[in-house]
Amino acid sequence: MIAQQHRVSSYVLSSSSSSSSRRKNNGRSFSSSSFFLKRRTTPPTRKVTTRAEAEGESSSKRKTTGATRTVVVTSGKGGVGKTTSSANLGMSMARLGYSVALVDADIGLRNLDLLLGLENRVVYTAMEVLEGECRLEQALIRDKRWRNLALLPISKNRQRYNVTRDNMNTVLDLLKKSDFDFIFIDCPAGIDLGFINAISNAEEAIVVTTPEITAIRDADRVAGLLEANGILDVRLLVNRVRADMIKNNDMMSVKDVQEMLGVPLLGAIPEDTEVIVSTNRGEPLVLKKKLTLAGIAYENAARRIVGKQDFLIDLEQPRKGVFQNIKEFFTGEDYE
Ligand SMILES: Nc1ncnc2c1ncn2[C@@H]1O[C@H](COP(=O)(O)OP(=O)(O)O)[C@@H](O)[C@H]1O
Ligand SMILES: [Mg+2]
C-alpha cells in the first residue's frame, strides 16, 4: 500500500510542474514540521477572544481586521466539502467576532443557504442588485443567530442569468466597500469559467481536498491556476480524514497530502456523520453545544486564519489535541 502511495505521489508530482514550483515559491511552501517551526518563532498575538467574549459582543463592538480579506474556498473535484467548509469557517469567524459575508458563487447548484438554514429567506440575489432592482443590503441575508454573518447568493437561476466576470467583480467591489472583515466565496467545482469568475477578485484561497488521489490531483491543478492568476496566499484544508484508515495505510496522511501539493496547511477535518445531520438542520457543526471533533477542527482552522493558533489537532490522538486546544483557548499559552 505504501509503495503504491509512493508511486501515486510521484505521478502527481511529475505530472505537475505547478506543485514543484510552489515548493520553491517565496518561502510559503514547506513541509509540515518546518511550518510549525516557522510559526512558532513568530507566535501570533496571544490576546485570544474567548467564545464567551465573542458571544457577549454586539455587532457594533465587533472585531475588525482593517481591510476586508477576500478568501475564495475552492477545489478541483466536486463534493469534497467546499460548501460545508465555507459555512463552518464563516460561522466560526462570526463567532470570533468578525463581520463575515459568505458569497454563494456556486450558481447552478447553490446550497450554502440550506447549510445555514436560510433557504426560505432568499428573496433577492446579487443579480437583482446588479440590475438595480434592490440595494446590496436587501440581498444580504443576515443570519438570525449571528447578525455579523451575512449570506449573498449570486443568482437563483443559472439559465436566466449569465453571470460574467464583470458581474462578479462589481458585486465583490460593492461588498468590499461594505463593512466586512472577511468575504468567503464558495466556489463552484471545476476549473471552467465559473471558477475563474469566482477567483478573479480574491486575494486569498483555501483549497479543499479529500485524501484521495483524484481530489488531490485536481486540487494541484487548481493551486497552479490560483498561482497563475496572482493568488499566492493559498492554504490547504484536508477534509474527510479518517485516522483509522491512515493507521492501516489505507488512506494518505494529512502530511502526505500537504507535501504532495506543496501548499501550507490550514487544517484537517475528520470524517464526521454529524455533517449530514447539521446539513439537514441548517445548522453548521460549529454551532453545536457539544462540539464534535470536526466542529473543533473547523474552529481551529478559523482561528488559524486570523493567526490565533499555531497548532493542529492531532486527529489520531484527538483528546490530547482537544485538551491542548482548550488550555490554549483559555490561557492564551503556547503548548509544547
Ligand atoms: N467532514 C465530513 N464528514 C462527512 N461528510 C462530509 C464532510 N464534509 C463534507 N461532507 C459531505 O460531503 C458532501 C459534499 O459536501 P459539500 O460541502 O457540498 O461539497 P462541495 O461544496 O465541495 O461540493 C455532502 O454530502 C456533505 O455532507
Ligand atoms: Mg458546494
Image: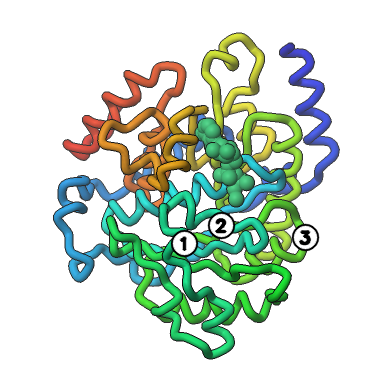
- Separation of disc 3 and disc 2 at Cα? 15 Å
**Labels 2 and 1 touching (C-beta < 8 A):** yes
Q: Say which mark, if any, is on residue 275.
A: none
Residue picked out by circle 3: 192
Q: Position of residue 287 (x, y in %)?
A: 32, 43
Point out the image quarter for the C terminus. Answer: top left
Write the residue at 27% across / 24% down. Answer: 323
Q: Which badge, 2 or 1, comes first in the chain's sequence?
A: 1
Type of residue at label 2? Asp
Type of residue at label 3? Asp
- Separation of disc 2 and disc 1 at Cα? 7 Å
**SS of the residue at dot 2?**
strand
Mark 3 is surrounded, within 10 Å at the Cα level, by few (under 14), some (14 to 19) or many (20 or more) other residues, namely few
Mark 2 is surrounded, within 10 Å at the Cα level, by few (under 14), some (14 to 19) or many (20 or more) other residues, namely many
Q: Position of residue 189 (x, y in %)?
A: 69, 52
The answer to whether residue 104 is seen in the rendering is yes
Residue picked out by circle 2: 186
- Separation of disc 1 and disc 3 at Cα? 21 Å
**SS of the residue at dot 1?**
strand
